[in-house]
Amino acid sequence: MSRQNILTGSPWEDKMGYCRAVRIGNIIEVSGTVAIVDGETVKKDDIYAQTHNILTRVADVLQQAGASMSDVVRTRMFTTQIARWEEIAQAHGAFFGEIKPTTGIYEVSALISPDYLIEIEFTAVLSE
């Protein structure tokens, strides 16, 4: 099986030796993704906006891998503010209300920057 690395041009990809997503065969794994536009954090105090930004950006990444959000079978959400889970759920539900992947939401003590309130990983599987 061939491997397709999907890069987004982030300086962290080379610094840390990773890519946004990897597709091997019909499986696509998407790295933990935070809310950022043009190098700036999306609305530092708005967890809904950050979640929505991540989901929108990952939809584009999946398209580059030949997939869509309907191929997502699992999301893993890491937040520093679990008490705001309903705002996260509202954004997640707007994208996945009909698709219904498995998911988990976990509170963590910190993300790579204190400005990030949420980070999400994705797994997608294409029909063979």
Image: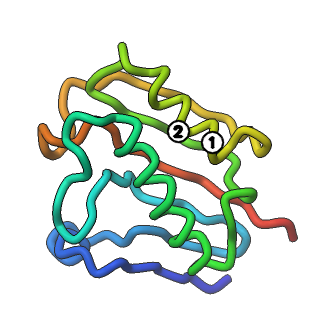
Q: In this image, 50 relative to 70: left or right? A: left
x, y percentage for residue 49?
37, 44
Compared to 88, does 33 lie above or below? below
- Residue kind at label 1, given as amino acid type: Ala
Compared to 13, does 116 lie above or below? above
Identify the residue at horizontal 68%, vertical 66% (top origin): 68
In the figure, residue 87 lies in which quadrant? top left
x, y percentage for residue 82?
36, 18
**In the picture, which quadrant includes the C terminus?**
bottom right
Identify the residue at horizontal 15%, vertical 72% (top origin): 15
Q: In this image, 75 relative to 36: left or right? A: right
Residue hosting label 2: 91
Q: Could you say which is closer to the camera, residue 118 or residue 2?
A: 118
x, y percentage for residue 56?
50, 59
In the figure, residue 25 lies in which quadrant? bottom right
Checking the image for residue 114, the label placed there is: none
Q: Is the residue under label 2 in contact with that under label 1 (CB below 8 Å)?
A: yes
Tell me how far mark 1 sits from mark 2, CA to CA.
Answer: 5 Å
Q: Could you say which is closer to the camera, residue 67 or residue 35?
A: 35
Q: Residues within 10 Å of mark 2 (few under 14, many from 20)?
A: many
Identify the residue at horizontal 13%, vertical 44% (top origin): 113
Checking the image for residue 94, the label placed there is: 1
Question: Tag 2, which secondary structure?
Answer: helix
Q: Residues within 10 Å of mark 1 (few under 14, many from 20)?
A: few
Q: In this image, 44 relative to 107: left or right? A: left
x, y percentage for residue 62?
58, 69
Identify the residue at horizontal 31%, vertical 69% (top origin): 18
**In the picture, which quadrant includes the N terminus?**
bottom right
- Residue kind at label 2, given as amino acid type: Ala
